[in-house]
């Protein structure tokens, strides 16, 4: 099975993947587009339509214990990431660039599929699902942090035990209408100046999605959170909602 299919099944928890019935090349391209769209919509202020497709863990008042636990996660993650300034080291340790054919990504995810699988069962701050890089002015990839993931059906208590909900708001993408597999040309389709598909679409019901010939995903991806541990020591910055 292709790595993109593995990512969608084990990492972000796609509810239905019919790769066996479709051309793998087309499926991989469609899957990559979904993840690219998700990343793009989280890169800045979100529209009202985008907010329809996002579920956040509830906000809570932080305690001293919460801050201490979160800082320990940051400490362990920074220690684990120290050697990955060079992406070649990350690749040697089993991390693979997700969607390498997608150019001009705002954030590049190097994913370890073993870690993605294990994150479904236990949390290890030193073993993130993905290492995150951004393109520097000189063209090189600059290490900025990591992404943790969790199964989409995980309850708030278990998410809080991983990274305190008062410090970090986990998010997952919901109610997506996407083009049917193999119809990537439809990603650019618009009606009334609004995207028909993806996280900026006003469509958020199965019936409306069916009416435009799309596939509806109530919850296409699991819980995730980015830890921008090289953005400073302020926890609000480290665990900012934006990718």
Image: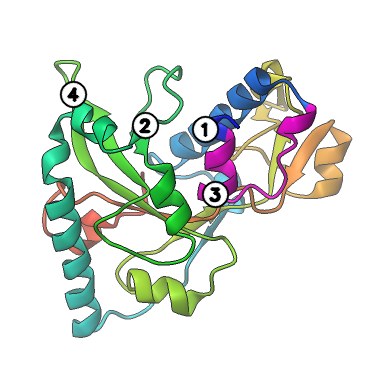
Q: Quadrant of residue 168?
A: bottom left
Q: Which image quarter holds the C terminus?
A: top left
Can see residue 148? Answer: yes
What residue did someone put label 2 on?
96
Upstream in sequence: badge 4 or badge 1: 1
- The percent coordinates of residue 176 (x first, y second) are 67, 44
Upstream in sequence: badge 2 or badge 3: 3
Disc 2 to disc 3: CB gap under 8 Å: no
- The percent coordinates of residue 62 (x first, y second) are 28, 79
Disc 1 to disc 2: CB gap under 8 Å: yes
Residue under the point 56% across and 27% down: 33
- Decide: is 227 above or below 69: above
What residue did someone put label 1 on?
3
Mark 3 against mark 4, which lies toward the viewer? 3
Foreground residue among 239 and 30: 30
- The percent coordinates of residue 73 (x first, y second) are 22, 65
- The percent coordinates of residue 63 (x first, y second) are 24, 84
> Is-magenta flag for residue 17?
yes
Upstream in sequence: badge 1 or badge 2: 1
- Element at label 1: helix
**What's drawn in magenta, residue-wise?**
5-21
Query: On the picture, is 140 further left or further right than 167?
Result: left
Separation (CA) of disc 2 from disc 3: 15 Å
- Give the number of the disc on residue 10: 3
- Give the number of the disc on residue 136: 4
- Classify 10 Å Cα crowding around label 4: few (below 14), some (14-19), many (20 and above): few
């Amino acid at each position: 099975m292709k790595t993109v299919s593995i990512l969608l099944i084990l990492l972000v928890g796609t509810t239905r993947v019919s790769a066996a019935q479709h051309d793998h090349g087309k499926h991989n391209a469609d899957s990559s587009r979904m993840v690219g769209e998700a990343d793009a919509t989280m890169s800045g202020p979100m529209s009202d339509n985008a907010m329809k497709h996002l579920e956040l863990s509830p906000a809570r008042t932080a305690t001293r214990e919460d801050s201490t636990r979160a800082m320990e996660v940051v400490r362990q993650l920074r220690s684990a990431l120290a050697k990955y300034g060079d992406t070649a080291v990350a690749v040697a340790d089993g991390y693979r660039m997700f969607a390498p054919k997608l150019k001009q990504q705002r954030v590049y995810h190097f994913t370890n599929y073993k870690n993605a699988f294990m994150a479904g069962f236990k949390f290890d701050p030193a073993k993130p699902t993905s290492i995150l890089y951004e393109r520097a002015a000189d063209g090189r990839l600059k290490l900025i942090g990591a992404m943790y993931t969790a199964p989409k059906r995980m309850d708030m208590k278990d998410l809080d035990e991983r990274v305190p909900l008062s410090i970090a708001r986990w998010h997952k993408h919901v109610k997506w209408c996407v083009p049917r597999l193999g119809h990537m040309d439809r990603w650019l389709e618009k009606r009334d100046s609004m995207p028909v598909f993806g996280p900026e679409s006003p469509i958020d019901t199965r019936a409306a999605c069916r009416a435009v010939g799309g596939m509806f995903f109530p919850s296409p991806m699991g819980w995730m959170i980015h830890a921008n541990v090289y953005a400073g020591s302020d926890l609000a910055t480290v665990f900012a909602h934006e990718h």
